[in-house]
Image: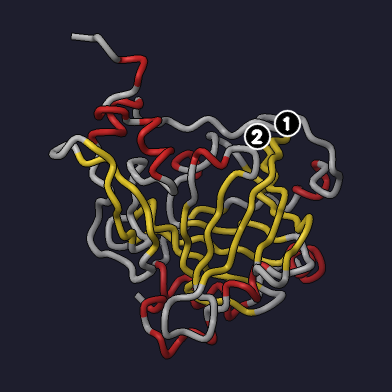
C-alpha cells in the first residue's frame, strides 16, 4: 500500500486536503454505497465550517441526498502525523454530536491541494484490497465538468478499476449549495448489538497499519477493559478512546441491560 511508504508522504498531506476552502465532493468509491451510507444516496458533500490551524482540526458539515431529502450533520476531522514523519498522512473523523461513537482513521493515498484526494477506507474492503474513495473539489467539477485527469488515473491504478459513481451532476440543482437541513441525525447503519460488540476482537483484517493510536478494548479472557495500541486499520466497535467508554459499554463483558439474562 503506497500510504505505508514514508518516502511518499509529501503526496499524502492530510492537512492540505482538509484545509481546503472549497466544498469537496465524493466522486467515486470502490464499494457499494449502501455499505457506508443509506441505499440510493448521492451528492455526498463536505463543507468547511471552522478550522483550527494550530491543532490541525477541521470542523465540517457533511451532506448527502437520499430519497428527495437531505441529511446533514457535523463531523470533526483532525490531521495526524506518524512518528518520524514530517507530514500528516492520515486523519481521524468523528461525529461532532456523537463523540461516544469514537473515531475512525483514514490514510491519505494521494492528494493534490485544492483538487482531489484519494482516501483509503480501512473499514471496508474489496476482493483484493482495502477500499478507496476519490474526493474532488466541487468548484473544479462545476467549472470543468470533469475531475482532474491525473486524479482519476491514479485512483484506477492504486485502487482498481471497479468503482461506483456517487456524484450526480444535478447535485447543485438539488439544493446542495444551500444550508437547508432536512435531517440532522446519523444515517442508519446495521451494527452489532452491545453484547456482540463486547465479544468482538479489536481488529480484523489482513494487515495492521502503523499509526500506533492508544485505545481500550474489552478482553473476554480476563473479563476487563485493557490498553490496546491500534494501528489504524480494520478496527471493530470493540475499540474505545477511554477506559470509561469501554467499561460503560462492556461492564463485566456485557451491557447492563443484559444483566441477569440467562
Position of the N terminus, as image quadrant, is bottom left
Q: Residue at x 53, y 64 (%)?
A: 91
Q: Is residue 196 rendered to the left or right of residue 166?
A: left
Q: Bin the neighbour count of mark 2 within 10 Å (Cα to Cα): few under 14, some 14-19, many 20 and up.
A: some
Quick one: which residue is furthest to the left in this view? 221
Q: Residue at x 25, y 9 (%)?
A: 260
- Alpha-carbon span between mark 1 and mark 2: 5 Å
In terms of depth relative to the viewer, which is nearer, 125 or 94?
94
Question: How far across and how far down the image is residue 2, in percent?
Answer: 39, 79
The relative height of residue 243 versus residue 129 in the rendered view (above or below) is above
Residue 8 picture quarter: bottom left
Give the colour scheme of this rendering: secondary structure
Position of the C terminus, as image quadrant, is top left
User: Which residue does the numbered mark 1 point to in the structure image?
Assistant: 69
In terms of depth relative to the viewer, which is nearer, 14 or 162?
14
> Element type at marker 2?
strand
Q: Is residue 144 rendered to the left or right of residue 102?
A: right
Tag count: 2
Q: Bin the neighbour count of mark 1 within 10 Å (Cα to Cα): few under 14, some 14-19, many 20 and up.
A: some
Which disc number belongs to residue 66?
2
Amino acid at each position: 500500500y503506497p500510504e505505508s511508504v514514508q518516502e511518499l508522504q509529501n503526496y499524502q498531506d492530510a492537512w492540505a486536503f482538509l484545509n481546503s476552502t472549497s466544498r469537496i465532493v465524493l466522486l467515486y468509491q470502490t464499494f457499494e454505497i449502501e455499505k457506508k451510507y443509506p441505499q440510493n444516496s448521492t451528492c455526498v458533500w463536505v463543507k468547511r465550517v471552522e478550522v483550527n490551524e494550530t491543532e490541525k482540526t477541521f470542523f465540517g458539515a457533511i451532506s448527502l441526498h437520499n430519497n428527495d431529502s437531505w441529511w446533514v450533520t457535523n463531523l470533526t476531522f483532525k490531521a495526524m502525523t506518524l512518528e518520524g514523519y514530517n507530514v500528516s498522512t492520515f486523519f481521524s473523523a468523528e461525529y461532532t454530536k456523537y463523540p461516544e461513537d469514537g473515531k475512525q482513521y483514514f490514510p491519505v493515498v494521494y492528494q493534490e491541494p485544492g483538487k482531489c484526494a484519494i482516501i483509503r477506507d480501512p473499514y471496508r474492503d474489496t476482493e483484493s484490497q482495502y477500499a478507496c474513495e476519490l474526493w474532488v473539489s466541487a468548484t473544479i467539477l462545476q467549472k470543468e465538468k470533469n475531475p482532474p485527469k491525473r486524479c482519476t488515473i491514479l485512483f484506477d491504478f492504486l485502487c482498481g478499476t471497479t468503482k461506483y459513481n456517487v456524484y450526480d451532476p444535478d447535485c447543485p440543482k438539488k439544493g446542495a449549495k444551500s444550508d437547508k437541513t432536512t435531517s440532522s441525525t446519523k444515517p442508519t447503519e446495521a451494527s452489532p448489538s452491545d453484547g456482540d460488540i463486547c465479544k468482538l476482537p479489536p481488529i480484523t483484517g489482513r494487515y495492521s497499519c502503523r499509526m500506533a493510536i492508544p485505545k481500550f478494548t474489552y478482553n473476554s479472557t480476563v473479563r476487563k477493559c485493557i490498553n490496546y495500541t491500534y494501528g489504524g486499520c480494520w478496527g471493530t466497535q470493540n475499540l474505545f478512546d477511554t477506559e470509561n467508554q469501554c467499561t460503560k459499554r462492556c461492564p463485566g463483558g456485557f451491557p447492563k441491560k443484559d444483566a441477569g439474562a440467562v
